[in-house]
Structure formats: C-alpha cells, structure tokens
Image (cartoon, rainbow, N blue to C red):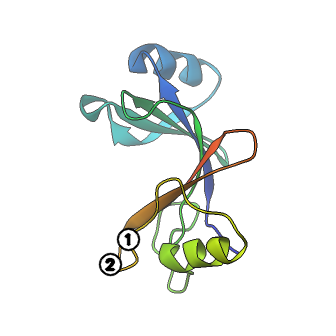
C-alpha cells in the first residue's frame, strides 16, 4: 500500500511563533499562506505543516497522487481505494472519504494510541 509522501501536520496555537521556531532549526517555507492560517515548511526531505485553528490534534499526513515535490504522479492508488483496502483489514475511518466522488478527497483513521492519520489526496 503506497500512501504517498509523508509529512507531520501540527496544530499550532501561534502560527508566527511556530514559524520562527521551525525556521530557527533550519526549515524554510515551501508552500502555504499565513493569511489562511497555514504554512508548509521543509528541511531537506522533512516536511512539517503548521495549521492554526484548523484541527485539534497533530496528525501524520500522507498525500497519494503526489511525489515528494507535490507534483502529480502519472500512476497512483486513489484515496478511495486505499480506504477500501483499510476497511477490508478492519480499519474503519473516523472521517471517511466519499466513495461516490472522484478527484481530491481525504479520510482520517485513528491509530491504537489515538493519533489521527490523514490520507489527503489533492489530485
């Protein structure tokens, strides 16, 4: 099962303060918009998303359909198929993707320790 590139999505209290911290340890803005309360920062292959007021907990995030530079892959497993495969293994999404749609979609599963895992397809 290929979930796509990995990043850590952090629920931050103060976007500007978090940005200063992560920039101080070598991260640089890659994408995002502070006016919309989120930034995507990179340090080499490490990607951290900073999200203020968007969700309650930090999340592990995967992006099927993208390569490590957020470019669309010619061939990938659709998020709805990944969800189907997980359901077949007894893992029920806390927030399911709509299986009647195509294109961008996401689902969230919760690991045994309560950590949310977001599978977020943008293409």
Q: CA distance from mark 1 to mark 2?
A: 6 Å
Secondary element at image label 1: loop
Residue drawn 63% across the image and 72% down it: 87
Secondary element at image label 2: loop
90 or 118: nearer the viewer: 90
**In the displayed image of the protein, which residue is found farthest to the bottom?**
75
Residue drawn 58% across the image and 31% down it: 27
User: On the picture, is 90 further left or further right than 52?
Assistant: right
The residue where tag 2 is placed is 101
Q: Position of residue 61 (x, y in %)?
A: 58, 51
The residue where tag 1 is placed is 98
Residue drawn 49% across the image and 60% down it: 107
69 or 3: nearer the viewer: 3
User: Cβ–Cβ below 8 Å for labels 1 and 2?
Assistant: yes
Residue drawn 65% across the image and 22% down it: 25
Q: Position of residue 82 (x, y in %)?
A: 59, 74
14 or 24: nearer the viewer: 14
42 or 86: nearer the viewer: 86
Q: Position of residue 100 (x, y in %)?
A: 34, 80
Quadrant showing the N terminus: bottom right
């Amino acid at each position: 099962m290929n979930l796509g590139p990995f990043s850590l999505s952090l629920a931050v209290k103060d976007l500007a303060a978090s940005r200063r911290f992560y920039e101080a340890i070598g991260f640089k803005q890659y994408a995002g918009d502070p006016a919309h309360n989120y930034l995507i920062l990179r340090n080499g292959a490490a990607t951290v998303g900073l999200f203020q007021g968007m969700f309650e907990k930090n999340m592990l995030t995967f992006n099927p359909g993208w390569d490590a530079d957020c470019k669309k892959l010619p061939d990938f497993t659709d998020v709805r198929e990944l969800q189907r495969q997980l359901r077949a293994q007894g893992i029920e999404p806390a927030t399911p993707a709509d299986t009647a749609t195509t294109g961008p979609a996401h689902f969230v599963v919760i690991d045994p320790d309560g950590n949310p895992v977001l599978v977020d397809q943008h293409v």
